[in-house]
Amino acid sequence: MALIAFEQLSISFNDGDGQDECRRIQAVRDVSFSIEPGQTLGLVGESGCGKSVTAMALMGLLPRPDATVDGGSIRFAGQDLLALRPRQMTDLRGNALSMIFQEPMTALNPVLTIGEQLMEPLIRHRGESPRVAWQQSITLIGEVGLARAESLMRSYPHQLSGGMLQRIMIAMAIGCRPQLLIADEPTTALDVTVQAQILALLRQQTRRNHMALMLITHDLGVIAQMAQHVVVMYAGRVVEQGPTRQILARPLHPYTRGLIASRPVPGQRRKRLYSIPGQVPYLAALPAGCAFAGRCDQVTERCRQSVPPLIGDQRRQSACFLTPLTATQGDACHE
Ligand SMILES: Nc1ncnc2c1ncn2[C@@H]1O[C@H](COP(=O)(O)OP(=O)(O)OP(=O)(O)O)[C@@H](O)[C@H]1O
Ligand SMILES: [Mg+2]
């Protein structure tokens, strides 16, 4: 059984302009994909495509009352997270399901020491005594590759560098040995050398603890290094998904092809880096057909009239009228 299964999840927001109360932003539409135990899944797409909203829904952190779940479910080991009481969700969050955020400085409490923040989930979820939680926190600091653990425990967030803080965030997130860790753009705020170290640490931790990782990023290079499976989102929908090697070698959706073409490849000289023309449409006023139609170089009349369904099998899917049915099925057989 999948560890996490999103099934036809749809989420909308109040438009918030105060003029038209009925207008809603369709942030996530009919999203279905699953994460296997121990698997690293990459979630990619341009800014505003619904990646973080999908993650927040899983963690029970959608901003209420602005956000509404319009349909679908998110199953964790079979149980629907959207049907849980807030108390039950609090028990899972930071425990079996954990998340690290893009900006470590804003995610940590500036007036509490690193030690207090590391110990808190261990005391709350695991029922450890402060003495045991202190010892376990020291071990965790070592596990994420930081030295001088005793002195770090007594430090405040502002005394640490960005890279150190992100390591502390990872230590906090893995403290209760989660089955799933969500990392939302975990390296975007860090410089390149520190980025590589943090990715290596995440890879080491997922392997060592057989932890599933949902890695949200704009960076297909990161996906290539880290993820076994990729889900590509565009304007709130899944437009393509499949095993990373297949997606990168033979993308089926024109949007995925555009993302791959706009990625800088080390050692490859190009006069100008490709960029997908245009931008993601405004989600409160999506066109009738395929949301990518306005930017697609292979658009047909049919694309402007109806939304292409996601076709394929469980492993490889694409939502484009140009995707030959046999392409997705054939791929699945070869992997
Ligand atoms: N609190 C909110 N209120 C209203 N609309 C929101 C809110 N949060 C998200 N949205 C809408 O949902 C859409 C998806 O947002 P989301 O944060 O999931 O994008 P994303 O794919 O994570 O982008 P990024 O790569 O920039 O982080 C946004 O385009 C925005 O219109
Ligand atoms: Mg985001």
Image (cartoon, grey):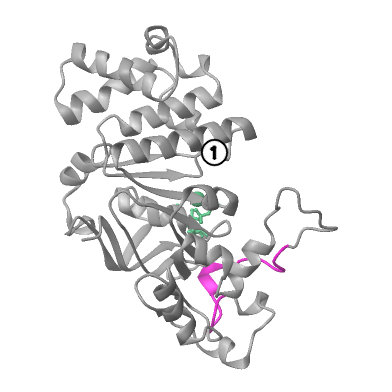
Chief SS of the magenta region: loop
Q: Residue at x 18, y 40 (%)?
A: 91
Q: Is residue 174 above or below residue 292?
A: above
Q: Residue furthest bottom?
A: 301
Q: Amino acid at mark 1?
A: Thr
Q: Residue at x 57, y 52 (%)?
A: 218
The quadrant the N terminus occupies is bottom left
Left or right placement of residue 324 versus residue 260 in this view:
left
The one nearer the camera, 45 or 269, is 269
Q: Is residue 41 above or below residue 194?
A: below
Residue 129 figure quarter: top left
The one nearer the camera, 332 or 82, is 332
Q: Residue at x 82, y 58 (%)?
A: 272
Left or right placement of residue 309 versus residue 136 in this view:
right
Boundaries of the magenta span: 275-291
Q: Residue at x 52, y 68 (%)?
A: 283
Residue 131 in view: yes
Which residue is the site of mark 1?
A: 187
Residue 25 in view: no
Q: Residue furthest right?
A: 271
Q: Position of residue 190 (x, y in %)?
A: 59, 33
The one nearer the camera, 94 or 244, is 244
The one nearer the camera, 69 or 153, is 153
Helix, strand or loop at label 1? It is: loop
Please check the rendered image and state whether residue 287 is part of the magenta-colored stretch, yes or no.
yes
Please check the rendered image and state whether residue 215 is part of the magenta-colored stretch, yes or no.
no
